[in-house]
Image: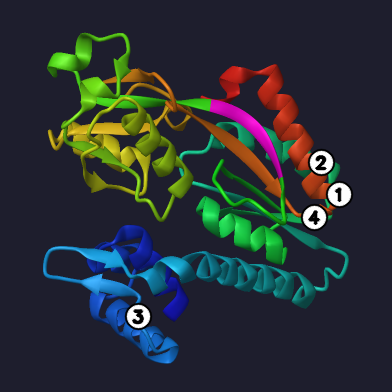
Amino acid sequence: MELESFVAVAEELHFGRAAARLHRGQPTVSDAVKRLESTLGGRLFHRTSRRVSLTDLGEALLPDAHAALAQLRRFQQRGRSLAAGDQARTTLVVAHAEYTCHQLLLRCLPQLRDRFPDVTIVPESMPTTAQLTAVRMETIGLGIGWATDGVTGVRARVLSTERFVALVPAAHPLAGQAELSASELSTTDLLTWPHQINSGLCDRLLSAFHIGGADLRIIRTADSVHAIAAHVAAGTGIGIAIESALDHEPPGLRMIPLVGPSTTADQVIFTPTEPSAPATALRDLLLRTSAESPSAAY
C-alpha cells in the first residue's frame, strides 16, 4: 500500500487526486506516504499548501517503485495461475508509457495471444524511466516508451518517430496556423506532461525551445493527454502533446504540428538483452505493423 500511494502521488502530484485514483481516503494515502518516508529515513515529497513536488530522493526512487509494483503484480498473476492448477502458463508483462501508440499495441496483442496461447499477457502502464529499471531487472518482458539518455543494459529499437503538436482552442488567434514554431509559443502558458513521467519527452521539448531561442513556460502538467485537452478547453493555456496520442482532434480544439529542430521524438521498444520468445515475437509484430501501417499509431 505504501508503494502504491507513493507512485500515485508522484504521478498526480496531488494527494486528493491520488486518493481518488486509488479509491481510498486522502488521510489514508498521506499516512501511507509518511510511513514509507519513516522507513526510508528521508522525505519523498516537498509539500506546501499550493503544490506537491518530488524531492531528489523521491525522483531517484520512483523508477524502482514502479519496478517493484510490476514485480508484485507478476507474482500475484503467477500465484493465481499456479493456484488454479495451470502449471505451464508463463507471464509476459508488457509496459507502455503514457502517450505511446496504444492502438498499435491493441492490434498486435491478439496476434501474440494466438501464437502463444499458454502465455498470460499483462499490459502495464509505466513511465519510460521505470521501464528501463524493470527491463534490467526482468520484471517486465517488453516496454514501449520514449527515447531518453543513459539507456544501458537493455535492447532498444525505434518503433516510430512522432511529432509534437500544440492543442489550441478553436477561437485562439493561433488556431488558423497550419504549423507552429517554438518561438511562436514563447512566453505562452503551456500545459504538458510531468517530467518524472516522461523525462525524455520533456528534455526533447526543452531542447526545441532552447534551440529556437524561446521561453518554455509550463504552467501546469497532467498525466494524460485527455486531461491536457480538458484544461485547454477550459481556457487554461495551450497544450503540448504527441500526435499519435490522439486518435482524433478534440471537439473545439485545433491540433497544430510543431516545426523546427527537436520537435519530434522517437518511440522506442525496450527488451532485456536476451528477451523471451513471446517478447521477441511481440517486438517483431510491433515493428512490422508500424512499418506496414503508419496510420496504426493514430
Residue contact between numbered discs 3 and 1, judged by CB atoms under 8 Å: no
Which residue carries the number 1 mark? Answer: 277
Closer to the chain start, of discs 3 and 1, is 3
Q: Which residue is mark 2?
A: 281
Q: Of marks 4 and 3, which one's residue comes earlier in the chain?
A: 3
- Give the Cα separation between the discs numbered 1 and 4: 11 Å
Query: Residue 189, relative to residue 277: is it above or below?
Result: above
Pick whichever, 259 or 116, lies toward us. 259
What residue sits right under mark 3 in the picture? 33
Amino acid of disc 1: Ala
Q: CA distance from mark 4 to mark 3?
A: 35 Å
| Residue 265, x across and y down, in percent | 50, 32
Q: Is label 2 in a helix, a strand or a loop? A: helix
Residue 142 x, y percent position in the rendering: 69, 50
- Label 3 amino acid? Val
Image position of 280 (left or right of 21): right
Residue 177 versus residue 202: which sits nearer the camera? 202
Q: Counting residues from the N terminus, which is met first, the one under dot 4 or under dot 2?
A: 4
Mark sitting earlier along the chain (1/4): 4
- Tell me, yes or no, whether the two marked residues, 2 and 1, touch with CB atoms within 8 Å: yes
- What kind of element bears circle 4? strand
The magenta stretch is 156-161
Whether 90 is among the magenta residues is: no
Q: Residue at x 81, y 41 (%)?
A: 281
Q: Would you say the residues marked 1 and 4 are in contact, meaning their CB atoms lie under 8 Å apart?
A: no
Give the crowd class for mark 2: few <14, some 14-19, many >=20 residues within 10 Å: some
Residue drawn at point x = 31 percent, y = 8 percent: 178
Please tell me the numbered disc located at residue 119.
4
